[in-house]
Image (spheres, coloured by chain):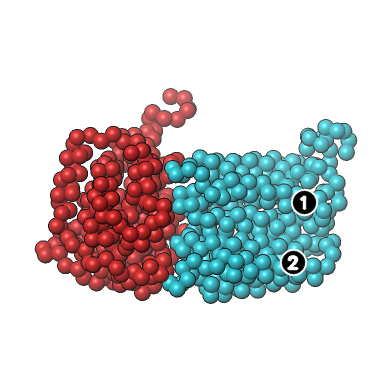
Chain colours: A red, B cyan
């Protein structure tokens, strides 16, 4: 299966949420290693029975978990009639700040289970994020592929409401409040009348609770996205990811 | 003109040192901003293939300068329109003017890279297509009429452009068109925003036109002839809010909510400009 075919499996032409699927991670040719298969199998095993989503219909999921765990849970949710919508907006690279190889492998290895779910084109969405997206620090010569999400990366509240989505469930592990970038999205949805619930899978026992999303800094400001992207490194092929230059080895001046 | 070389060499002839300096600086700024604009679009490739609107956007800056050139040819002061060097100088300033202004669009939440290329958002593309022409009209108007030099063009066009920027920001923030364009991806808002921006640029450009008397007189003229731009801006904000996508209608009709109100406001602007009568 080539990259475009793989993308088409996750983002079918007639899918209701296809315009929001991020293509950058699909675009890189990738050869699966044995350890990646093993890691995906372990992630799928962890996801199995970890959490049962509410009955699909008027609920959308936002899975903000660590790397392959988010994707594996999304594939599990597909069995409950949720359409996984991968929003990974970051590239692969050597010596990367955010290791995306397990995610890329998961996209390839999870496609069978996704096909088996036989999802309807209008299936409720399960937006998939990597909670490690802005973690870590970049040093010179590292591939800085940290990223953030923006309101523009998700369907608007109007689109969700038009598709009869009334509730959004934020799924995290080890956190009960949304990350700052996600708060910009969730607050827009909450303001428009969607109910926001959160569940911390690391809690014992995990409980679904309604939350009030706190207003993040620069919420609604026209320049908020510019402000955030100033600290990130873009990739020419889309998304984020670029090698951090080393001042001692680059440049064209005299030594 | 002393020699045919004067066509190409701005220092051979009556151009003053400051005019030569402005021409050189404007040319450099035009080149850099145009290159930045085109390079940003060319360099970003969507992994799924061609991006709609990308080519149109790449050329929009040049087309906007063509609008400036036509206005200069038709209505600028006779000493400017009869001298290719001055035609070039004011066109280059126009190119730099539009180019520099467009670099600020990400500050307003509209980005060619983020919205047009990466998210393939046609609404944002349409909005960004309208802005260079609105800016070109606002700038070109300041070139119409007799005046002592380039600095009066900077003043007249600068005030017109500043008012245009305020109206655009009002539409994006108070009218929440920014959300409709980038989050809702509402094409109707994109069409309306582009047409209304052009209408505002037209009115403000016409208001900035005229023979130079003084800065105070220019401001009074701008207020007297340019107030319909504020009215257009107010109507645009009301329309932006009233015609926002809703859960019942997440995709507004492009024709009924975009083309019709946009053209109606553009027609109103044209009527006002015609009503003001012949240009000086």
Give the number of the disc on residue B270. Answer: 2
- Residue at (43, 72) in percent of width and height: B247
- Residue at (57, 73) in percent of width and height: B239
Q: Which of A22 and B92 is in front in this view?
A: A22
Q: Return the x and y of residue B58 as percentages of the image width and height.
A: 59, 46
- Residue at (68, 49) in percent of width and height: B63
For the residues bearing labels 2 and 1, Cβ distance under 8 angstroms = no
Q: Could you tell which of marks 2 and 1 lies nearer the N-terminus?
A: 1
Please tell me in which quadrant of the rendered image residue A117 appears. bottom left
Tell me the residue that label 1 is attached to. B70
Viewed as shown, does residue B109 lie left or right of A195? right
Please tell me in which quadrant of the rendered image residue A90 appears. top left
Q: Return the x and y of residue A122 as percentages of the image width and height.
A: 36, 62
* Badge 2 density bin: few <14, some 14–19, many ≥20, Cα 10 Å: some
Residue at disc 1, secondary structure: helix
| Chain to which mark 2 belongs | B
Viewed as shown, does residue B21 lie left or right of A170? right
| Chain to which mark 1 belongs | B
Q: Which of A125 and A186 is in front in this view?
A: A125
Q: In which quarter of the image is the C terminus of chain A?
A: top left
Residue at disc 2, secondary structure: helix
Viewed as shown, does residue B261 lie left or right of B115? right
Q: Is residue A122 above or below residue B46?
A: below
Mark 2 to mark 1 CA distance (whole Å)? 17 Å
Q: Residue furthest top?
A: A255
- Residue at (42, 58) in percent of width and height: A152
């Amino acid at each position: 299966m080539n990259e475009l075919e793989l993308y088409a499996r996750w983002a079918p032409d007639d899918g209701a949420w296809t315009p929001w699927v991020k293509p950058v991670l699909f675009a890189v040719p990738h050869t699966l290693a044995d350890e990646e298969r093993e890691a995906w199998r372990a992630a799928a095993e962890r996801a199995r029975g970890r959490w049962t989503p509410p009955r699909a219909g008027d609920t959308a999921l936002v899975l903000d978990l660590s790397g392959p765990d988010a994707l594996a849970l999304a594939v599990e949710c597909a069995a409950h009639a949720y359409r996984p919508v991968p929003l990974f907006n970051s590239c692969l690279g050597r010596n990367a700040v955010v290791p995306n190889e397990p995610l890329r492998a998961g996209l390839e290895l999870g496609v069978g289970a996704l096909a088996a779910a036989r999802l309807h084109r209008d299936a409720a969405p399960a937006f998939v994020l990597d909670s490690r997206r802005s973690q870590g620090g970049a040093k010179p010569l590292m591939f800085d592929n940290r990223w953030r999400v923006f309101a523009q990366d998700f369907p608007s509240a109007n689109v969700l409401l038009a598709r009869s989505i009334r509730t959004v469930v934020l799924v995290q592990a080890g956190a009960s409040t949304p990350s700052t970038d996600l708060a910009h999205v969730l607050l827009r949805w909450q303001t428009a009348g969607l109910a926001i619930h959160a569940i911390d899978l690391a809690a014992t026992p995990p409980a679904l609770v309604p939350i009030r999303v706190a207003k993040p800094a620069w919420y609604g400001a026209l320049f908020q996205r510019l402000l955030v992207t100033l600290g990130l490194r873009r990739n020419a092929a889309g998304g984020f990811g670029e090698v951090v230059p080393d001042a001692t080895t680059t440049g064209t001046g005299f030594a | 003109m002393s020699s045919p070389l004067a066509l190409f060499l701005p220092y051979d002839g009556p151009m003053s040192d400051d005019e030569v300096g402005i021409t050189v600086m404007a040319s450099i700024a035009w080149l850099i901003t145009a290159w930045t604009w085109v390079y940003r679009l060319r360099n970003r490739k969507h992994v799924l293939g061609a991006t709609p609107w990308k080519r149109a956007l790449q050329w929009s800056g040049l087309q906007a300068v063509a609008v400036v050139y036509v206005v200069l040819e038709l209505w600028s002061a006779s000493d400017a329109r009869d001298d290719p060097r001055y035609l070039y100088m004011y066109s280059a300033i126009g190119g730099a003017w539009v180019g520099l202004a467009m670099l600020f669009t990400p500050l307003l939440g509209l980005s060619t890279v983020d919205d047009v290329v990466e998210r393939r958002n046609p609404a944002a593309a349409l909005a960004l297509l309208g802005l260079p022409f609105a800016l070109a009209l606002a700038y070109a108007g300041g070139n119409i009429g007799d005046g002592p030099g380039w600095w009066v063009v900077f003043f007249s066009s600068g005030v017109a452009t500043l008012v245009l920027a305020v109206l655009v920001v009002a539409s994006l923030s108070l009218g929440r068109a920014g959300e409709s364009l980038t989050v809702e991806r509402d094409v109707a808002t994109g069409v309306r925003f582009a047409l209304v921006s052009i209408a505002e640029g037209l009115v403000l450009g016409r208001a900035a036109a005229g023979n130079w008397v003084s800065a105070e007189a220019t401001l009074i003229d701008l207020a007297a002839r340019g107030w319909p731009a504020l009215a257009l801006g107010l109507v645009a904000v009301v329309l932006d809010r009233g015609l926002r996508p809703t859960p019942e209608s997440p995709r507004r009709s492009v024709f009924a909510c975009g083309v019709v109100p946009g053209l109606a406001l553009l027609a109103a602007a044209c009527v006002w400009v015609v009503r003001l009568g012949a240009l000086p």
